Amino acid sequence: MKLNIAICDDEQNQIQYVKGIVSEWAEANGHMPFFAEFPSAEAFLFDYAENQNYDILLLDIEMTNMNGIDLAKKVREENDRVQIVFITGYPDFMSEGFEVAALHYLMKPVKKEKLFTVLDRAVENMKKGPRFVLFSLGKETLRVYAEDIRYAESDGHYILLHAGEETHRLRMTIPETEKILGEGFFRAGRSFIVGLKYVARITKTEIILLDGTVLPIGKGLYDDLNKALIAYLRGI
């Protein structure tokens, strides 16, 4: 498989080190990597304005001026398919990765076996087409991209399914909806199911989505949601 890979790090020795590991992995798996190297987030974005044909981004977090998290946020404004991997010496930024759907965090110095595993997952994700979920509407069937669903909420005997720019009103229960949605979603209480992709941050009592929507967390579910978010971020 041809792979366009960008490595962004303000330390040239780190770029060459990571590039060497990726090259070894690609050769072992029959892939053809095409590398682009950038010493700063600004240099990457200057190139990205003209060339958005990247499959995998390997980003340092701590860089001069704009950091890797802010760079990833810029990319995610228009591109939700590229595989983003953070390589950092600081574990404190992991929670911010919820906002950019990072594939994984790797701590410096990067271990070859760890990066091999993450790259394998990146390729598997690229091979997958968008997942659809199907809802029966009497004699009709509603087909919705799973990745477009921000959340579902109970409305009497109905469910309000918030997906993309639309809200669908479906006659079904929260348990029925939870079963249909499957992986990538978390039941946050009796009345809400949230798409983990859209969670920006959580508190002990609330879930804040990327669009600013605030949803309540059911009593005693904070720890479970936090674990689900970390597992989703790591692709477990």
Image: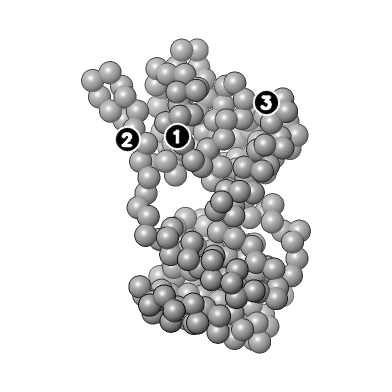
Residue 55's image quarter? bottom left
Residue pointed to by mark 1: 181
- Mark 2 or 1: the one toward you: 1
Residue 138, x across and y down, in percent: 28, 18
Residue 28's image quarter? bottom left
The answer to the question of whether label 1 and label 3 lie on touching residues, with beta carbons closer than 8 A, is: no
Left/right placement of residue 47 relative to residue 15 reads left
Looking at the rendered structure, which numbered label has been put on residue 202? Answer: none
Judged from this view, the residue extending furthest toward the left is 139
- At 50% from the left and 17% from the top, the residue drawn is 155
- At 74% from the left and 70% from the top, the residue drawn is 89
Among numbered discs 2 and 1, the one appearing first in the sequence: 2
Residue pointed to by mark 3: 218
- At 53% from the left and 38% from the top, the residue drawn is 185
Q: Kindly identify the amino acid type of the residue bearing the numbered disc 3.
A: Gly
CA gap, disc 1 to disc 3?
A: 19 Å
Task: Locate the N terminus and report the quarter of the image it occupies.
Answer: bottom left
Residue 16 visible in rendering: yes
Left/right placement of residue 153 relative to residue 169 reads right
Left/right placement of residue 99 relative to residue 62 reads left
Q: Kindly identify the amino acid type of the residue bearing the numbered disc 2.
A: Arg
Residue 43, x across and y down, in percent: 57, 78
Front residue (pair 32, 55): 32
CA gap, disc 2 to disc 1?
A: 12 Å
Determine the secondary structure under disc 2: strand
Residue pointed to by mark 2: 143
CA gap, disc 3 to disc 2?
A: 29 Å
Q: Using the image, determine if residue 141 lies above or below residue 202.
A: above
Determine the secondary structure under disc 3: loop
The answer to the question of whether label 3 and label 2 lie on touching residues, with beta carbons closer than 8 A, is: no
The answer to the question of whether label 2 and label 1 lie on touching residues, with beta carbons closer than 8 A, is: no
- At 53% from the left and 71% from the top, the residue drawn is 116
